[in-house]
């Protein structure tokens, strides 16, 4: 099955993805912190809100919602799974 | 004396539990510097036992200097023989983010031979939504007792106290969870598995949160909601606190009318009237404003909206090195820098908090308003343009306000671009708290504590400076003639400093006294020109200034000077306390003072060049 690999930041509202990996450009301490917050490789993440004007987006991981800006989200590689009705 | 440590991840309801168990109202937060505020209080129901509340953290693997200090404090506490138990609070509605930290805490307690009690908080939310969690299974898996509680409703607290008493009466060895040698990476995986297996099922909570977010973060509706809420915030600062501020002013005046005439000694009477009631009173009048602002900001925080406001403002402020969380403090700074500096506590990034501190004193606070009003009335003609649509004086007021805000953003933009090593700072990762109805009691208690902190901490410094300025202005001729006082002499000495702005010694003295508080400028100038009550009725003073031969260029230079210079002892005091660095406050005072002076001289000379 072909899956589209892109960055977490490129997701639109309602889109679901699975985390594949982290860019090396993201500092190690950031990467560890993101994983501590639940953004593990293999974890399913849903983009709940993608506000206008490149404002930080709201993502759901497990039962928690986090807002990330492109500084972090653009360094997380994900494969698209589809859209979520949430 | 037995000590119990309370730890947990941010937004897990730790402070609420601490307050419930101790009867105190401690608010714990990470702070820059070498120490971290750790709250402690005696347990109300268990004698000779202290509960120590640590700042919330996601992990024992710190990513910033502040987290490092907090974690170090925790590790040191584990070595303390008086520490008998560790309470680890988890948010039962969002288990995974709490469980990783909990496993780390259990591992550390196992290594140090301490007891751990895990508290599953927010059970009331799960019950309300009929969501089940398997706490017994989780307790068995992590080898630690788990007590379900609701710190908010108070449920499960009796059971917790019973458990704590039992542990104190029957001391036993540390926990044996078999985690002592487990590395962090494995704990992360365990936490994920445990949350999936025993955590709450379903996503009702997320769905209800997302529904509200689709309105509050909507590209159009969210913008309207944001401006509506900010309008209410401004109303609270300027309008709602006004009656209370007037009441404080009237009350102090009435008290002064009773006390001052009863003092027979003239010097003591003058000191009581001018230094105590006028000087200290000028700062006490801000207490209601701080109370109201803290209350509204607390309301926004507790309701969950503050995180959304930070998100909306993040992008535009990021251009200037700030964060979305800087918005509320900067907005508050338009009313008064003091509550604004307090509000900057909510910024977790040390660098961005510092930049916000730098921006706040440049925001056009209400204390500048009487100065601007006086100078604009004196130097800007009361004419209109564009067929009466634009009043020149109104336009000047708008421009000077805009100038202050632009300077604030310019400073933070420049400083952030010249600060190396951006990866020492925290990225914008914000946990979106659930929406909820705020509790009135904690909000009132927090506002009361903040106001008390303002009076007790800043009051001492303000009192000292007030006394110094009063002594300089009063002696050696007992207040008969300000120009012949020591302050007047200083005015003559510093006159050459103000000469490049086209100002004589009288304006120099007025500027010097306004370092106490900007609005003092108007009153002092009134005294210099022999006008009583100039701060209430400015017209005679405006006429005197116009008649004194002061040029428009000097007026513009003064406007620019007041827009930039950090001339407020209260702000300096609070800045020093909150940043834990008096050096920072002094550096900002010097930098803004020099910049204000250079720009004012430039404006004056430019005006001369254009023959204004």
Image: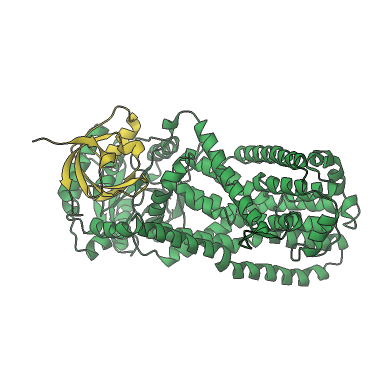
Chain colours: A yellow, B green
Q: Nearer the viewer, residue B226 or B384?
A: B384
- Which residue sits at x=28%, y=29%? A23
Q: Residue furthest top?
A: A24
What is the quadrant of residue A32 in the picture? Answer: top left
**Residue B90, position as x, y percentages in the image:** 29, 50
Picture coordinates of residue B71 (x, y %)?
39, 38
Give the number of marks. 0
**The one of B538 and B468 positioned closer to us in this rendering:** B538
Closest to the observer, B250 or B382? B382
- Residue B175 shows in the view: yes
* Residue B48 located left or right of residue B191: right
**Residue B95, placed above or below residue B443:** above
**Can I make out residue B19 in this image?**
no
Left/right of residue B286 with respect to residue B69 in the rendered view: right
How far from the left and from the top, in percent, is residue A80?
18, 40
Q: Is residue B549 above or below residue A33?
A: below
The residue located at (54%, 43%) in the rendering is B409
Position of residue B475 measured from the top left corner of the image (x, y, whole percent): 87, 52
Pick the front one: B333 or B600: B600
Location of residue B284 with respect to B328 vertically, above or below: below
Residue at the extreme left of the image, as rendered: A1
């Amino acid at each position: 099955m072909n899956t589209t690999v892109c960055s977490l930041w490129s997701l639109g509202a309602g889109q679901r993805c699975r985390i594949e990996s982290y860019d090396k450009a993201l500092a190690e301490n950031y990467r560890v912190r993101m994983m501590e917050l639940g953004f593990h490789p293999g974890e399913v993440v849903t983009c709940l809100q993608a506000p206008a004007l490149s404002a930080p987006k709201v993502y759901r991981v497990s039962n928690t919602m986090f807002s990330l800006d492109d500084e972090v989200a653009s360094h997380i590689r994900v494969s698209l799974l589809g859209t979520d009705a949430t | 004396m037995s000590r119990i440590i309370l730890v947990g991840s941010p937004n897990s309801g730790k402070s609420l539990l601490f307050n419930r168990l101790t009867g105190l109202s401690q608010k714990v937060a990470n702070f820059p510097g070498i120490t971290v505020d750790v709250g402690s209080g005696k347990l109300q129901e268990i004698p000779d036992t202290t509960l120590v509340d640590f700042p919330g953290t996601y992990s024992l693997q710190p990513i910033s200097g502040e987290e490092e200090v907090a974690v170090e404090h925790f590790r040191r506490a584990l070595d303390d023989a008086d520490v008998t138990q560790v309470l680890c609070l988890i948010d039962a509605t969002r288990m995974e983010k709490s469980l990783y930290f909990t496993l780390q805490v259990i591992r550390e307690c196992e290594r140090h031979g301490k007891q751990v009690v895990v508290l599953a908080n927010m059970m009331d939310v799960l019950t309300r939504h009929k969501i089940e969690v398997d706490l017994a299974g989780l307790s068995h898996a992590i080898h630690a007792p788990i007590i379900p509680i609701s710190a908010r409703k108070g449920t499960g607290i009796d059971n917790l106290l019973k458990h704590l008493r039992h542990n104190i009466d029957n001391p036993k060895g540390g926990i044996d969870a078999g985690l002592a040698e487990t590395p962090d990476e494995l704990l992360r995986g365990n936490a994920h598995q445990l949350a999936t297996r025993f955590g709450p099922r379903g996503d009702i909570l997320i769905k209800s949160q997302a529904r509200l977010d689709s309105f509050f973060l909507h590209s159009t509706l969210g913008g309207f909601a944001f401006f509506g809420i900010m309008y209410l915030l401004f109303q609270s600062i300027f309008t709602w606190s006004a009656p209370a501020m007037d009441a404080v002013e009237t009350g102090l005046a009435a008290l002064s009318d009773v006390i001052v005439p009863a003092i027979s000694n003239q010097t003591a009477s003058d000191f009581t009237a001018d230094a105590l009631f006028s000087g200290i009173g000028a700062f006490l009048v801000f207490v209601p404003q701080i109370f109201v602002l803290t209350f509204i900001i607390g309301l926004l925080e507790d309701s969950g909206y503050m995180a959304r406001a930070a998100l909306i403002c993040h992008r535009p402020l990021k251009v200037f090195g700030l964060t979305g969380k800087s918005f509320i403090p900067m907005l508050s700074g338009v009313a008064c820098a003091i509550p604004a500096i307090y509000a900057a506590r909510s910024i977790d990034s040390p660098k961005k908090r510092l930049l916000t501190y730098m921006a706040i004193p440049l925001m056009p606070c209400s204390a500048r308003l009487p100065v601007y009003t006086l100078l604009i009335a004196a130097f800007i003609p009361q004419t209109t343009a564009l067929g009466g649509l634009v009043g020149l004086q109104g336009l000047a007021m708008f421009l000077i306000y805009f100038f202050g805000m632009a300077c604030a953003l310019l400073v933070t933009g420049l400083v952030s671009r010249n600060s190396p090593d951006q990866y020492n700072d925290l990225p914008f990762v914000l946990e979106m708290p659930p929406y909820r109805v705020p509790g009135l009691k904690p909000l009132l208690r927090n506002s009361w504590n903040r106001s008390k902190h303002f009076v007790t901490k800043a009051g001492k410094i303000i009192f000292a400076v007030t006394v110094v300025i009063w002594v300089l202005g009063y002696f050696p001729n007992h207040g008969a003639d300000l120009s012949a006082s020591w302050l007047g002499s200083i005015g003559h000495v510093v006159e050459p400093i103000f000469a490049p702005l086209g100002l004589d010694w009288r304006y120099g003295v007025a500027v010097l006294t306004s370092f106490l508080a900007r609005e003092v400028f108007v009153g002092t100038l009134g005294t210099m020109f022999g006008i009583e009550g100039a701060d209430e009725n400015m017209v005679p003073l405006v006429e005197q200034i116009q008649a004194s031969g002061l040029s428009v260029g000097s007026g513009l230079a003064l406007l620019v000077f007041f827009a930039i210079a950090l001339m407020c002892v209260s702000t300096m005091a609070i800045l020093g306390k909150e940043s834990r660095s008096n050096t920072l406050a002094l550096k900002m005072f010097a930098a803004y003072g020099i910049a204000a002076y250079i720009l004012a001289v430039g404006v004056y000379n430019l005006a001369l060049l254009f023959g204004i």
